């Protein structure tokens, strides 16, 4: 049962004439006759009684008429829906992101994307970068935004930007008052408030401290599971931390916190990448979102 056969059937139903149906469909009458015959063969029943020039629906034809019209309507609707998805005007986009990018970078990108493509349904799923990579691999999200991504078979990683890691202190702290970049050894003896062990940011900070040779001399007095909580602890004068600069920009601007560059760690930055499956079909919505990320981040 093909759509062209259904179109011929519906046209003959409406005109009660093979000739007028052929004219409407821009086909020859024999072509319309063949399509109706093929449909009747497929359904194993006669759909029309042909009485000279008069064409009447059989009982089977009457039963088929409503379904044929509905199938043609759905086919037309499907073409429009797919066309909207292809053009980026509709569809669904699922994004995975780690907490840093989801909290401090994605909101403005998502807002601009929604303004440009209001017909695209957006879904955001968060997790640590390794979990986001698993979401992408499992195809439960269309693409992921991660930090410090290591090459992974089957995934494409498109570098977007890098963010700096800085020492973050309250305004009255001696390091903040020095008005100069801090050397990592100056962190020795300072109460440090860090992300809990096992998180990507904690592993990165531990590597920085180890590289500087001060890992054994720093005092980690508090471990928390999110950056926002760490910032509140710093504001309460309970210690300092090493955090992404993007996570404290608002507090620095209002004077609640101070961000201090690391003088001996010029490479203290982390890469942000967009990852997606190598075999993923890149829809117009995905391409538009990737392009927007590249411009805005």
Image (cartoon, helix red, strand yellow):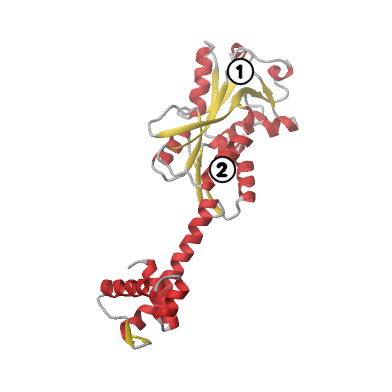
Q: Nearer the viewer, residue 278 or 136?
A: 278
Q: Work out which quarter of the rendered image holds the N terminus and state it.
A: bottom left
Residue 140: x percent and y percent?
Answer: 42, 46
Residue 260: x percent and y percent?
Answer: 67, 20
Q: Residue at x 52, y 10 (%)?
A: 213
Q: How many marks?
A: 2
In this figure, which residue is indicated by the disc labeled 2?
A: 289
**Category of crowding for the residue at label 2, using alpha-carbon neighbours closer than 10 angstroms: few (below 14), some (14–19), many (at least 20):** many
Residue 190's mark?
1
Q: Is residue 12 above or below residue 218?
A: below
- Distance between the alpha carbons at the discs numbered 1 and 2: 42 Å
Badge 1 vs badge 2, beta-carbon distance below 8 Å: no
Residue 22's mark?
none
Disc 1, SS? loop
Q: Nearer the viewer, residue 60 or 221?
A: 60
Disc 2, SS? helix
**Residue 118 visible, this orientation:** yes
Q: Work out which quarter of the rendered image holds the C terminus and state it.
A: top right
Residue 231: x percent and y percent?
Answer: 63, 32
Position of 191 with respect to 257 (left or right) is left
**Category of crowding for the residue at label 1, using alpha-carbon neighbours closer than 10 angstroms: few (below 14), some (14–19), many (at least 20):** some
**Residue 91 visible, this orientation:** no
Residue 72: x percent and y percent?
Answer: 43, 70
Position of 159 with respect to 14 (left or right) is right
Q: Nearer the viewer, residue 17 or 215?
A: 17
Closest to the camera, between mark 1 and mark 2, is 2
In primary-sequence order, the first of circles 1 and 2 is 1
- Please identify the quarter of the rendering in which residue 271 is found: top right
- Please identify the quarter of the rendering in which residue 191 is found: top right
Q: Residue at x 34, y 71 (%)?
A: 35
Position of 44 with respect to 192 (left or right) is left
């Amino acid at each position: 049962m093909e759509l062209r056969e259904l179109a011929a059937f519906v046209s003959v139903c409406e005109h009660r004439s093979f000739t007028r149906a052929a004219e409407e469909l821009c086909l020859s009458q024999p072509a319309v006759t063949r399509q109706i015959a093929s449909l009747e063969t497929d359904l194993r029943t006669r759909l029309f009684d042909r009485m000279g020039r008069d064409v009447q629906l059989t009982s089977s034809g009457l039963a088929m008429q409503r379904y044929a019209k509905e199938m043609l309507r759905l086919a037309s609707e499907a073409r429009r829906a797919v066309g909207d998805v292809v053009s980026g005007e509709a569809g669904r986009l699922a994004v995975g992101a780690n907490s840093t990018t989801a909290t401090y970078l994605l909101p403005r990108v998502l807002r601009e994307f929604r303004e440009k493509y209001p017909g695209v349904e957006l879904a955001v799923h968060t997790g640590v970068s390794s979990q986001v990579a698993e979401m992408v691999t499992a195809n439960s999200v269309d693409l992921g935004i991660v930090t410090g991504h290591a090459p992974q078979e089957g995934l494409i990683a498109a570098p977007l930007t890098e963010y700096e890691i800085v020492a973050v202190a309250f305004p009255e702290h001696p390091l903040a008052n020095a008005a100069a970049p801090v050397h990592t050894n100056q962190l020795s003896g300072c109460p440090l408030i860090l992300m809990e062990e096992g998180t990507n940011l904690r592993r990165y900070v531990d590597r920085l401290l180890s590289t500087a040779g001060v890992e054994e001399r720093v005092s980690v007095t508090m471990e928390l599971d999110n950056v926002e909580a760490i910032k509140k602890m710093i504001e309460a004068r309970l210690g300092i931390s090493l955090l992404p600069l993007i996570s404290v920009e608002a507090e620095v601007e209002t004077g609640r916190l101070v961000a201090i560059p690391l003088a001996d760690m010029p490479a203290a930055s982390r890469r942000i990448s967009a990852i997606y499956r190598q075999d993923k079909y890149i829809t117009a919505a995905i391409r538009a979102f990737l392009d927007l990320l590249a411009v805005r981040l």
